[in-house]
Amino acid sequence: MTVAIAGATVPRLARGVRLREDAARGGRWVVMAPERMFVPDEIALEVLRLVDGARSVDAIVDALAARFTAPRAEIAADVTEMLADLAAKGVIAT
Amino acid sequence: MSATAAGEIEPPLGLLAELTHRCPLRCPYCSNPLTLTRPGEEMDTAAWARVFREAAALGVLQVHLSGGEPTARRDLPELVRAASEAGLYTNLITAGVLLDAAKVAALAAAGLDHVQLSVQDAEPTSADHIGGMAGGHAKKLEAARLIREAGLPLTLNAVVHRRNLDRLPELIALALELGAGRLEVAHVQYYGWAFANRSALLPTRAQLDAATATVEAARAAHKGRLVIDYVIPDYHAKRPKACMGGWGRRVLAITPAGRALPCHAAESLPGLDFPSVRDTPLAEIWYQSEAFNRFRGTAWMPEPCRSCDRRDSDFGGCRCQAFALTGDAAATDPACELSPHHALLDLAVQEAAGGGFAYREMGRSALPSR
């Protein structure tokens, strides 16, 4: 299943998916989903924390470009690929 | 890991909350104990809400609201809200037959994250016969529709055995038709009620092989649309499952009356005193109680587990199955081919002959013994 992610797309966490801090295990962040959970890597976490159902993909890329030194186009490509992957796994909806 | 050093014990991830043992169904493989908790002994709303807060503070991330039939409790939306406000991911495990649109809406509004709905078969007459409730299957189909209309993610749980395993393709089709994102094909586990009905429920090897092939084909055909969870059942396996992810390691269960257990069937084991959450803090139960420490780690293990290189991955298998089959709760799970009792499983499969059910009923304790 491939999911089209455009700059104007507004992603949100899918119903039944929650991102939360896991204080009892050293303050890592975990994604809770139906019958499974996983620990996102650092980059996925940066993206997921900006997925709030209001920001567009462009706005997410802008926010990351303001914080990291990589070229905006490179960040945009990485974010788009990651969101498409998370959408295919049912973690985010568009 | 040493057996009891509190500093080395990890906090639990999941809590199985058996809110009630009341249930309109009478499935002959029910995972509840043979001696069911009476309604008058159930913990009240406030006690459960406190337990959810204690669990979240302890490190639990997810609560499974189960039973019996959890929707038999009128305060279920309050319990969902309490769990959700405590920060827990809430999963409702239901038979669905008591749900209507208003109840589903109330649960969704209370913060419910996910629903796991059971079905007994894909064919209505057989499903109602297995569940022991006329008209039950039709109500489940309606419940599934209501759950999906409310936008809640749905997992279909199909408990499979000798009497329905041949209809696995139809069960997979049903999961797709109902809009489930996941299908759990759960083989009956043989302790408690299911142990009493073992001869009627154990599938043949041919049935199992066909089912395994069906699952593999369906996984490929429906990739991206339906996830299928499936595990080869113990009676046809060579190695045991890491039951509950290890005793007192990942999960704890709490009975309707408030007993804390390392596994929902653990009350079948003799000689263990399970503490009550009514009078003991959950953290103390988890880290310090004798019952939770009894089979923790590897120090309690006999041979062949003790020197086995899989001891830290399967934890010796299931204590309840070991006790049910050998009379010794500390024995190697006979599901392991290294167990001296492994032949008992083959023998049970060969002797299984179908036949009638002893249905799960409150107050019914005169079951066939092993």
Image (tube, coloured by chain):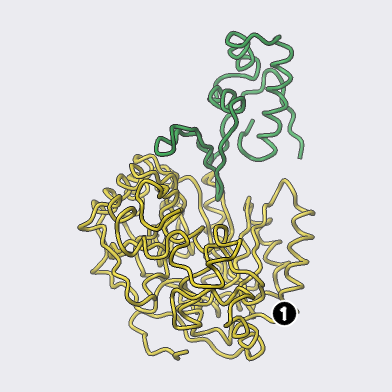
Chain colours: A green, B yellow
Front-most of residues A76 and B269: B269
Q: Could you tell me the amino acid type at mark 1?
A: Arg
User: Is B27 situated above or below A59?
Assistant: below
| Residue B19 seen anywhere in this rendered image of the structure | no
| Residue B244 seen anywhere in this rendered image of the structure | yes
User: Is A81 situated above or below B23?
Assistant: above
Give the residue drawn at x 48%, y 33%.
A28
Q: Pinpoint residue B308: horizontal percent, then vertical percent.
A: 59, 65
Q: Pinpoint residue B163: horizontal percent, then vertical percent.
A: 64, 80
Q: Which chain carries label 1?
A: B
User: Is B60 situated above or below B310?
Assistant: above
Give the residue drawn at x 63%, y 84%.
B343
Residue at far front of view: B307
Front-most of residues B135 and A2: A2
Front-most of residues B177 and A36: A36
Q: Mark 1 points at which residue?
A: B205
> Quadrant of the rendered structure where residue A9 is?
top right
User: Is B216 situated above or below B266?
Assistant: above
Q: Pinpoint residue B224: horizontal percent, then vertical percent.
A: 72, 46
**Kind of element beneath mark 1:** helix
